């Protein structure tokens, strides 16, 4: 596990929400998600710089399509985002977990990266 994955794993275990059990390296079809919350159908991927290469971006897009067809939403963050903007990353994840199906924006064409949405208070319930 990378430093970014370790840091995010610690943060995910601290989320104060019911029904947000995340699994690491969760198998979904022929793929493995870095982190998956099956109850909320949310996948979180932490990507290194190699994912900016065209071949990796194409593979990521194919995988995201598969996950979306299976009813999952995918949030992707760069390693350095997790390491340097942890609060913003955690807030973006928290916000995604709190959204209802009708509030979710339509899927974006990969390789979209979830943007940190500013600071907030992840201590409060949705």
Image: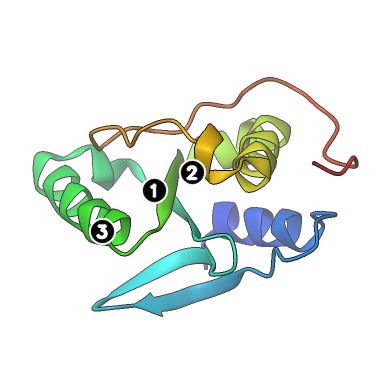
Which residue is the extreme one toward the front?
102
Question: Which of 16/116 is in front?
Answer: 16
Taking the spot 49% from the left edge, 36% from the top edge, the residue there is 104
- In the rendered image, the vertical position of residue 119 relative to residue 45, given as above or below: above
- In the image, 38 versus 44, the foreground residue is 38
Question: Looking at the image, what colour scheme do you see?
Answer: rainbow
Quarter of the image where one finds residue 39? bottom right
Q: Which residue has dot 1 on it?
A: 47
Mark 3 / mark 2, whichever is N-terminal = 3
Judge the density around disc 1: few (<14), some (14-19), many (≥20) Cα neighbours within 10 Å.
many
What separation in Å lies between label 1 and label 3 (alpha carbons)?
21 Å
Quadrant of the image containing the C terminus = top right
Percent across and percent down for residue 50 are 25, 46
Secondary element type, mark 1: strand
In this view, the mark in front (1 or 3): 3
Residue 69 image label: 3
Q: Tell me whether circle 2 and circle 1 mark residues in contact (CB < 8 Å).
A: yes
User: Which numbered marker is on residue 79?
Assistant: 2
CA separation in Å, label 3 and label 2: 26 Å
**Of helix, strand and loop, which one carries label 2?**
helix
């Amino acid at each position: 596990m990378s430093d970014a994955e370790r840091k995010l794993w610690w943060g995910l275990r601290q989320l104060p929400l019911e029904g947000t059990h995340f699994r690491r390296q969760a198998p979904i079809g022929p793929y493995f998600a870095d982190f998956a919350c099956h109850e909320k159908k949310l996948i979180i991927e932490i990507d290194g710089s190699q994912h900016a290469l065209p071949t990796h971006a194409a593979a990521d897009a194919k995988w995201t399509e598969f996950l979306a067809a299976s009813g999952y939403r995918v949030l992707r963050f760069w390693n350095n985002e997790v390491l340097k903007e942890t609060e913003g990353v955690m807030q973006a994840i928290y916000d995604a977990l709190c959204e209802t199906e009708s509030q979710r924006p339509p899927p974006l064409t990969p390789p979209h990266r979830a943007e940190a949405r500013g600071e907030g208070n992840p201590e409060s319930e949705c």
